[in-house]
Every structure is written in C-alpha cells, then in structure tokens.
Amino acid sequence: MLAKVLSSAVLGIDAILVDVEVDIAQGLPQFATVGLPDGAVKESKDRVKSALKNAGYEYPSRRITVNLAPADLRKEGTAFDLPISVGILAATGTVKPDRLKEYLLLGELSLDGRVKPVRGSLSVAVAAREAGLAGIILPMDNAGEAAVVEGIEVIGVNELAEVVEFLNRTREIPPCRVDVAGLFGMPEGYGEDFAEVKGQEHAKRAIEVAAAGGHNIIMIGPPGSGKTMLARRIPSILPPMSFEEAIETTKVYSVMGLLERETALIAQRPFRSPHHTISDIGLIGGGNSPRPGEVSLSHNGVLFLDELPEFKKHVLEVLRQPLEDGRVTISRALTSITYPSRFMLVAALNPCPCGYLGDPQHPCSCTPIMIQRYRSRISGPLLDRIDLHIEVPAVKYRELADRSEGEGSAAIGRRVEQCRTLQQERFRNTRVHCNAQMPPRFIKKHCEPDAAGHRLLELVTDRLGLSARSYTRILKVARTIADLEGAEQIREQHLSEAIQYRTLDRKPG
C-alpha cells in the first residue's frame, strides 16, 4: 500500500515542494525514514505513532517506509509530522486520496494529536501558490501568516482529526482570511518622535539626508549626547513599506519562528540593535543548519550598532558583503544559502576611549596613541562603506530647558517620502531602490556636478586623500541633498554639505 502527500521544506527564506511517500508492506514492525532527514525528522516516528493512537486511529504493525523526495535535499524540522501521519492513514485507507493532490500539508504533532505551529509558513504558502495547488493545510497558529498570500486556500487546523475529516469531505473548514490593507493601515507603532529630541539640529539634518537616500550613517559623540535616542527614531521617518518589502521581511522572521500569532505580516520597518558581544554567526547568520542573522532580521529596516569599536574586529569585517551586495551567502559542505540583507546601517561611537575628546566641560584623559588605537578598531574599508560621518556634541543646558518642541517625525517623514518617490521614478524598471544603491554607471549618469562642484571635489579629494569609494559616497549623498531641494543638477552647496558628513576622513584631535 502506497500513498503520497505533498509537503514542503524551507531552504533559506524560500520553500521547495517535497513529496512524502509512505509505503506499508508485510514484515516485522519497522519505521524507516529516508531522504536526508535530520534528527527532528527521524524522531517524528515516535510522535506520529503516539499521535495516531491517542487520536483514535489504528497504527499499522507492519514495515513502514517514508521517503522524502527530492532525496538529495536535507530535510529539517518537525513540519513533516502531519504529512507523514496523513500518509500512513491514506496508505491504510482511512483517508481518501482525492484531495491529497490538491493540498499541501505541514505541521508538528503533539502526542495527543494536536497540531502545533511550525516555521516558514509564509514561504510555504508562496511555494504552494506558485505550484498551482488549491490550498495548504497547516496549524491554526500559522494560518494568519500564510493567509497573507492571495490566490490560495489556507486551512487552519487544531487537531489531526480535523485534517482527516476535511480530506474525507465529512467536515468543511472555512479558509482563513486576512485583511492585508488593514495591516498596512494600522497606526504607526514606533512610539518615538523626533519632536522629543532637544537640540542636535545638525544631526537631525544628517539623519534626514541618510533616510532620504537610504545611506549608512555613523555618529560620533560623548556619552549622553543623544546618539541612541536619535537612532531609535530613524524608523519613524522612513517611508512606509511596500507589500513586496513586507513579504520579504516577514519571510525572514517566519523562518526564524519570530512571528507572533497576532502578527500576520511585518508592515513596519524593523529596528535591530544587537549587543556588542554578538558573534559573527549571530550578526551575519550561519551555524550547522544556516539561519539568518541580525543583518537579515533588519532587512528593509535599520541595523543599529552602538559602541561600534567594542564589537570584535572580525565581526565588523563580515559586514562588508551585506553592506555592498544587500545579501548574505552562507556556504556549507552540502548547500549554499542566500539571505536578503538590504538595511540601513546606523552606528555610534565615542570620540575616544574616555568619551570626552573635544568636550569643553570634561577634560579628555586619552593620549593620541590611545585615540588612534581606539579608532583603528574600525577598518578603513568598513568606514568607506558608511556614507555619512557626523559629530553629535553634548547638549547644552539652554537647549535641554527649552520647552518648545522641535520638528516632528511626521514632517520630516513627508520630505523623506517625497525624496524616495523621486528616486523610484529615476530608477524605475531597475533593481536600484534608492541613491545609496547606485552602481557606477548610474553615478556617472545622475551625479554629474556643475563646474564649481568639480573644482571643489578636486580640491577636497587631493587635500583629504579620499579613497575612490569615499569619492563616490560623497557624490551619492550630494545627489540626495539635491533631491531634497528638488534640484536637477548637483551644485557646489550640495557637495559642500556632503563633504561635511565625512568627519572620520580627517585626523582626530
């Protein structure tokens, strides 16, 4: 007796269809799972046996062979419990085979037959729709997440018995529905506003420029100057996420199992702030079974690294690829997985080890050697990939005591959104989304300065000894500043402001 059930395995953030073939033959009782199963898949035989018995179904005392095809792809996790159970019931005639070709099944089984949530449901729903299937049967806790995908039935279940009755057409289960437009229409949940920031007008302006062009930014200032406060408010001025961006970001969180049941879709830009003790695997992703890291969890959002020099140097160096390419490729002996990692990097550091270099109120106790050693923890190639370097001085008492509110996030956000809309028109039908992502041919086309700008660039490049990458970063930032003004061509004043945002290209002191 042979039965075939459709299921899926998640590879990276995408899903691949898997045929779960169950054969029950005469012989001594035995349960064998083939097709590169990991430990959790092999253990499913014990969960399946108990779940079937406790749910009131007969478990065959024969030789059971389960094949997970394609057999050369490693299968991980507990999502195969439900399709294996249904395959056994179909092979014994308890489940009719009619609907097995139309629906994809996944879910972990409890020993009493309850269906428990699994990871990667959104990716599986996308794969099922692309394969032309009628629907997907999965745990009720994952139904809202999968129902975001339109054009496919999402059947949420709580118990194994419900699955059997639905497949035998003795019970109708209405498909789960989600109001996607309503998810995007929910009020902003950031809860933090730039109106609460006292002073720091220069830093606010630089952050507006960075948000408008998707540029990376680093802030240098003494302890308590407001670097973290500024960083945490950056998502409140970024443009709203598109549906495609939300799906991409939600896939990453779904694969990691970080989606709550009430959160069907991540419709707001993520903000991630890992501690400086994080490992390179925690930041970039990896492990024996490669998982996304913080750079992928901040995809389409903000990655904030506070106290940047305190991070291990080799951890910071692995940031180069995601900053340059917008994705991370993790290679292992059996497979190579790519995760998206297009994020806005926001970093903060003190100007020196004691934190008070250049502060008129607190004398600095650091020697030039100490300052140089402290700054050298951040390599030149990494700094070159950060477009804006700005100083955030300590806030004066007069500014702190001022009762008037500064410009709020809503007003800044409107300017940022207008600027991003302009860039979307400029880069229509290309893979470029904002000025920060421009390749060299686009820089040559869209970032041509006027004559005065050329002279200024020549002077500054020679005097500061800027690298080629720093030079292109200045042009990209100047393009964004010109876009905020609505100017067609980059002029001298745009370049002057962009050059101001290269603080770390000058010697400390």
Image (cartoon, rainbow, N blue to C red):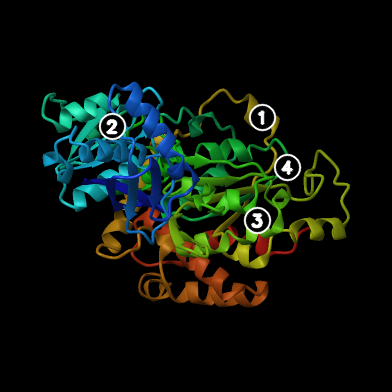
Q: Nearer the viewer, mark 2 or mark 1?
A: 2
Mark 1 residue crowding within 10 angstroms, few (<14) / some (14–19) / many (20+): few
Q: Would you name the residue on which mark 3 appears?
A: 315
Q: Is residue 220 left or right of residue 500?
A: right
Amino acid bearing label 4: Pro
Element class at badge 3: helix
Q: Is residue 480 above or below residue 184?
A: below
Mark 1 element type: helix
Q: Mark 2–mark 3 contact, CB under 8 Å?
A: no
Judge the density around disc 4: few (<14), some (14-19), many (≥20) Cα neighbours within 10 Å: many
Local packing at callout 2 (Cα closer than 10 Å; few below 14, some 14-19, many 20+) is many
Asked if the residues shown at circle 1 and circle 4 are in contact, with their CB atoms under 8 angstroms apart, the answer is no
Q: Position of residue 163 (x, y in %)?
A: 23, 30
Question: Residue 143 shows which numbered tag?
Answer: 2
The numbered dot on residue 398 is 1
* Residue 183 image point, x, y percent: 28, 32
Disc 1 residue type?
Answer: Arg
Question: Residue 334's x, y, as percent?
Answer: 48, 63
Say left or right for 126 vs 238: left
State the CA–CA distance, disc 1 to disc 4: 18 Å
| Disc on the earlier residue, 2 or 3 | 2
N-term-proximal mark, 2 vs 4 = 2
Q: Quadrant of the N terminus?
A: top left
Q: Position of residue 376 (x, y in %)?
A: 75, 61
Q: Quadrant of residue 506?
A: bottom right
Measure how far apart labels 2 and 4 are at the Cα level.
48 Å
Find residue 222 and name its label.
4
Compute the Cα span from label 3 to label 4: 24 Å
Residue drawn at (59%, 59%), measured in percent from left and top? 500
Q: Residue at x 31, y 42 (%)?
A: 122
